[in-house]
Amino acid sequence: MCGIVGYVGNKHAQDILVTGLKRLEYRGYDSAGIVTLGKGEPTLLRTKGKVAGLGSLVAKSKRSDMVGIGHTRWATHGVPSEANAHPHHVGNIFLVHNGIIENYKELREELKSHTFVSETDTEVLAALIDELYQRKDVKLEDAVTQALKLVVGTFGIAVVSPKEPGKIVAARQGSPLIVGIGKGETLIASDASVLVGHTDEAIYLNDGELAVCTAENVELMDLASQPVSAKVEKIEVDMAAIQKQGYDHFLLKEIMEQPTTLRSTLSGRVVPEEHRAQLGGLNLTEDELRSIEHVVIIGCGTAYYAGLLASYYLEQLVDDLTVEVQVASEYRYRSFHLPKNSVALIVSQSGETADTLACLREIKRRGVPVLGVVNAVGSTIAREVDGGVYVHAGPEISVASTKAFTSQVSAMTIFGVQLAQAKGAGLKELDEFIEELALLPEEIENVLQTKREEVEKIAKQYATYEHALFLGRDTLFPVALEGALKLKEISYIQAEGYATGELKHGPIALIDDKFFEVMLLQDNWLFDKSMSGFEEVNARGGHIVAITNSKKDIPAESIIRVETKLDMLAPVVFNVVQQLLAYYIAVEKGNDVDQPRNLAKSVTVE
Ligand code: F6R
């Protein structure tokens, strides 16, 4: 939530900052702004709305300044407006901030001499730093450190001042921040994508750390002003991964690249010839694995649904295992109990989700091993877990999560196989899962190649509906929930996912001509039961889109038949069809599919 960039070096900062903000726009797009320092007064440009608007301001302003900071905002305190846009300016201080200053009201009371011009918590921090900066012989980093000691909340900040124009001070507590080390240039960013094209060396700031950056040097310290040694790491993001590569939207690109990204998830981990599926990096011995009796899977949104689907697989794979799946924003405040021999799987694409991170920390505090199932390399969750796995889906830029789901489910299924193997489960049952995992990329590829146009045509018929129900049984229930989430967030059609068997306990009352129903019908032991639900909806005049791998006659209004050799993992293939359906409905409605209203991708605030 909110993206931060900073540049100090030997090139024109304005363009670099705007390009960086475009790459961070998935983090929020309520307003955007930059300030640059050079000869004369600082140049502050801010606008409500997207970074494209800022680009137009920069085109008119054309400054050759070589230092600056920028921000793209997801509004928390104060409406999206130019006045509330960052950078905030007070006296000699310009500040950009990602996070929430929780005690901003108290601090505001104490800063009576300042007239506040925005509704934000961030302006309070800028005013506080400015006040401390006015004291004699105080350097910018001293003023920032002293101010941060008085702050309660979360922050990733970058601060500049015309009094020390060749310097950016950045600090982190709870919101991600990295410092890119280039040749004669230093960059600050909320994620590594901003550094692409400049440098592949970076320092990931830890909580409570502050960086004093000039073009040639980066000095790290803690909030007690004690020096901290910097660990410079290689970053691995390539340009192609952060470009649309000919697709109209990142969302479509990310849906279409699932065969490739899933192959990366499975690579070296699933080897059917050796009857092996195994994750490195769990940091658990065979004995520790064998002793696991309970798994709690934690995530938010799509990551939670991935966990829910994986929980069915873990239960199928490991006889003596109990599995629970929890929404992080709830779990963190519950009086939860974890039995002896538990492990937690912390699932997150971004690796920065505040609620998920809070659960991780609480569970870790209780001495229960926490394993990450994370996509973003170097992210906070990835760095705080005891062990775990990167899903290697590559940067997911569109706000709605697609390819991460497929990789997360697969990675957790491998974990299940590994657990079962450690506990001595029969080779035959495990082999079925291993073979299905190995086949999954090809199956998804086949569906994407053969069904895309058909789904697009069908989607056009359903774009005018106001409501939708997604129905599935067993492993297709979490998929129904995920299908509804995808549709609602990008098409703004109100959509609910339900277990088909629950239909008659309430939701069937909803069915009318404003609704369409997506029914997930897998040709397996529950097919007839699912068809009962189908008949109940059909008898009430439902407008059913059936997604099925059955060859049987199904009297649906629309039908998408999926060819799949898979059994257990077929729901993952069904989900890909739903992703296409949601995408094409949203496109038909003319929506901004990559950046849906009110959302941000990386939810680093509560
Ligand atoms: C839905 C979506 C969100 C995220 C959720 C968790 O398409 O993108 O529901 O899945 O915010 O995010 P991560 O996985 O980054 O923790």
Image (tube, rainbow, N blue to C red):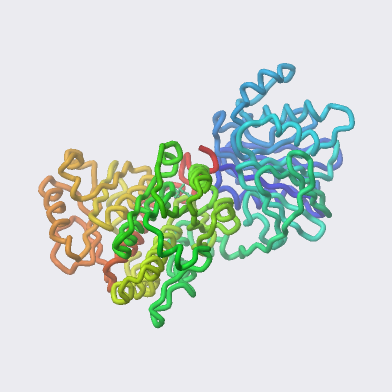
Which residue is found at the position 60% from the left and 46% from the top? 52
Residue 477, percent across and down? 27, 53
**Left or right of 154 on screen, residue 555:** left
Residue 381, percent across and down? 55, 52
Which residue is found at the position 58% from the left and 65% from the top? 240
Q: Is residue 536 visible?
A: yes
**Left or right of 391 on screen, residue 273:** left
Q: Looking at this view, is 62 or 47 the one in front?
A: 47
Q: How many marks?
A: 0
Q: Is residue 449 visible?
A: no
**Left or right of 28 on screen, residue 194:** right
Rendered position, 372 above or below 118: below
State which quarter of the image contains the N terminus. Answer: top right
Q: Looking at this view, is 64 or 350 the one in front?
A: 350
Rendered position, 139 above or below 55: above
Residue 296, percent across and down? 40, 51
The single residue placed furthest to the left in the displayed view is 539
Q: Looking at this view, is 572 or 491 the one in front?
A: 572
The single residue placed furthest to the bottom in the displayed view is 273
Residue 115 occupies quadrant = top right
**Left or right of 16 on screen, residue 480:** left
Rendered position, 168 above or below 451: above
Which residue is found at the position 35% from the left and 50% from the top? 324
Rendered position, 44 above or below 311: above
Residue 101, percent across and down? 62, 31
Residue 444 occupies quadrant = bottom left
